[in-house]
């Protein structure tokens, strides 16, 4: 009986530990957080959604949390068809909030966005490059880039994902050339298909590529 009770207690400890590492928290602005609680600092993926951040975006990015041990943060208010400056303000406020968490490595925040929110991610990161370690975009365009801080952006890791038949492919190819001229750490990946967001598997692969890029910096 004593051995049985010991096993149950051990299982309860393991389950409580796993649960403690996978609780989704929400702040007063609606931003969502999935943070590790192991006493260590982790890279954080700041996820931008075209329709505004929701819990399903946490579900999409959870594989990155589980496989790469990255934290996940989802910006609630940044979305397409909303003023870029308003989006930018909410993103920067979220970054400042993230840096208050002891499990967040403030020097290793990576922003992700698809299409219009990829453009938002690029525009914000290039304007405030010292706040970010890297940017991952899928099928983005250059329309969000205004007043970039090229001097401090040198070395910023930028992963541009486009498709063979993406209507933004030419924009990605041009951005890759320009970013290299300003000495950004750039990788351009062209996959099959049309303009469209990648699935969970692709997001994980993109983050793995970014992890390698960050280690090379």
Image (spheres, rainbow, N blue to C red):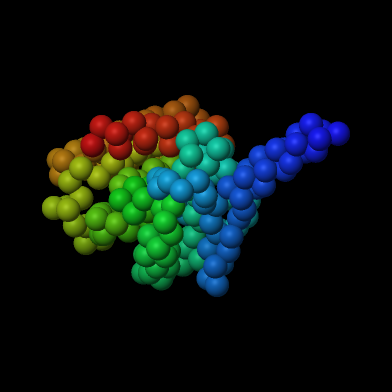
Q: Quadrant of the C terminus?
A: top left
State how many labels appear: 0
Name the spot of residue 12 as percent of width and height, x first: 72, 43
Q: Nearer the viewer, residue 153 or 70?
A: 70
Q: Nearer the viewer, residue 9 or 157?
A: 9
Name the spot of residue 4 as percent of width and height, x first: 82, 33
Name the spot of residue 95 as percent of width and height, x first: 38, 61
Q: Going 53% across and 56% down the picture, which residue do you hit?
A: 33
Q: Quadrant of residue 213?
A: top left
Q: Nearer the viewer, residue 56 or 138?
A: 56
Q: Quadrant of residue 17?
A: top right
Q: Going 81% across and 35% down the picture, which residue do you hit?
A: 2
Q: Residue furthest top?
A: 192
Q: Going 66% across and 40% down the picture, which residue do you hit?
A: 14
Does residue 176 appear left or right of residue 104 in this picture?
Answer: left
Please say if 117 is above or below 17.
Answer: below
Q: Residue furthest right?
A: 1
Does residue 177 appear left or right of residue 120 in this picture?
Answer: left
* Residue 116 seen: no
Q: Going 37% across and 53% down the picture, which residue do you hit?
A: 121
* Residue 35 seen: yes
Name the spot of residue 141 as percent of width and height, x first: 36, 48
Q: Nearer the viewer, residue 123 or 214?
A: 214
Q: Quadrant of the N terminus?
A: top right
């Amino acid at each position: 009986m004593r051995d049985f009770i010991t096993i149950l207690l051990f299982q309860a400890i393991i389950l409580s530990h796993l649960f403690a590492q996978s609780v989704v928290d929400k702040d007063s602005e609606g931003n969502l957080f999935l943070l590790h609680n192991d006493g260590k600092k982790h890279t954080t993926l700041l996820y931008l959604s075209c329709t505004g951040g929701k819990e399903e975006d946490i579900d999409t990015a959870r594989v990155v949390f589980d496989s790469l041990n990255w934290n996940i943060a989802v910006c609630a208010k940044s979305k397409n068809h909303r003023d870029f400056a308003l989006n930018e303000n909410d993103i920067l406020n979220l970054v400042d909030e993230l840096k208050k968490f002891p499990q967040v490595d403030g020097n290793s925040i990576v922003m992700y966005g698809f299409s219009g929110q990829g453009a938002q991610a690029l525009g914000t990161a290039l304007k405030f490059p010292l706040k970010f370690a890297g940017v991952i975009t899928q099928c983005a365009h250059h329309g969000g880039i205004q007043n970039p801080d090229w001097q401090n952006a040198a070395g910023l890791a930028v992963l541009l994902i486009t498709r063979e038949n993406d209507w933004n492919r030419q924009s990605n190819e041009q951005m890759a050339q320009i970013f290299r001229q300003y000495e950004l750490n750039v990788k351009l990946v062209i996959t099959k298909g049309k303009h469209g967001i990648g699935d969970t598997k692709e997001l994980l692969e993109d983050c793995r590529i970014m992890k390698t890029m960050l280690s090379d910096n």
